[in-house]
Amino acid sequence: MLKLLKTLLRAGEPTVKYPFAPLAVCAGFRGKPQLEPEQCIACGACTCACPANALTMETHPEENSRTWQLFLGRCIYCGRCEEVCPTRAIYLTQEFELAVTQKSDLYVRATFRLQHCRHCGLPFAPEKSVALAAALLIHSQQAPQLADMLHAQLSLCPACRRREALEHHDSLNIHYFLEKQL
């Protein structure tokens, strides 16, 4: 009997005191997704990759905004959103205690402003996406003197950019002319 008591004392504590002490998780643990809105360009790659449809993105042109939303009640913590994000704006934390008292606390939202076309005035893309595209193009061209021209091109919506490319400034493209006549 004494031998058994000695063995038990040497063994230590067989369980963790989880509710009363923090629980250590392993390095690859996939917990609550966290968004860094400063880094996000509202491209929507994460919403397309989410198999559980926990991530959604809605564009409201009348409010000049695009809203990104995560519903933690649907999230399966697969990590696809983290894999596809081009700016590393979303990542999985090690936080796993997600109990809430209200369902509305399970929603995480971020709102982004839209870029307006300098020609027709319609919103066409998030401002951050256009700014990142301009910065990447300027950096890849290694020609800062072209920055104004690139900003001017990128501030046009696709329809106005297409129309401007077809006009050729002095001459008129025959396909564009025929399209206007019909």
Image (cartoon, rainbow, N blue to C red):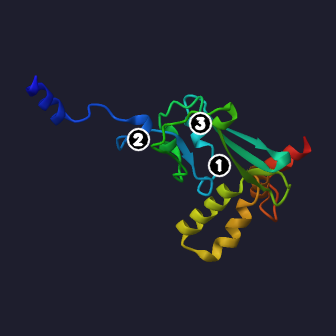
Which residue corresponds to mark 3? 48
| Mark found first going from the N terminus, 3 or 1 | 1
Q: Quadrant of the C terminus?
A: top right
Q: Residue at x 82, y 46 (%)?
A: 61
Residue neighbourhood size for the residue with mark 3, other residues' Cα within 10 Å, grouped as few (<14), some (14–19), many (≥20) = some
Which residue corresponds to mark 1? 42
Q: Quadrant of residue 70?
A: top right
> Which of labels 2 and 1 is toward the front?
2
| Mark found first going from the N terminus, 2 or 1 | 2
Amino acid identity at mark 2: Ala
Looking at the image, the residue that sits furthest to the right is 181
Q: Residue at x 71, y 57 (%)?
A: 127
The label number, if any, that marks residue 134 in the structure image? none
Q: Quadrant of the N terminus?
A: top left
User: Would you say 28 lies left or right of 44 here?
Assistant: left
Q: Secondary structure at mark 2?
A: loop
Q: Is residue 22 above or below residue 162?
A: above
Q: Residue at x 22, y 36 (%)?
A: 12
Q: Position of residue 30 (x, y in %)?
A: 44, 38
Q: Position of residue 8 (x, y in %)?
A: 17, 30
Q: CA distance from mark 2 to mark 1?
A: 38 Å
Q: Residue at x 83, y 48 (%)?
A: 63
Q: Secondary structure at mark 3?
A: helix
Q: Is residue 85 above or below residue 48?
A: below
Q: CA distance from mark 3 to mark 1?
A: 12 Å
Q: Position of residue 106 (x, y in %)?
A: 63, 35
Amino acid identity at mark 1: Ala
Residue neighbourhood size for the residue with mark 1, other residues' Cα within 10 Å, grouped as few (<14), some (14–19), many (≥20) = many
Which residue corresponds to mark 2? 21
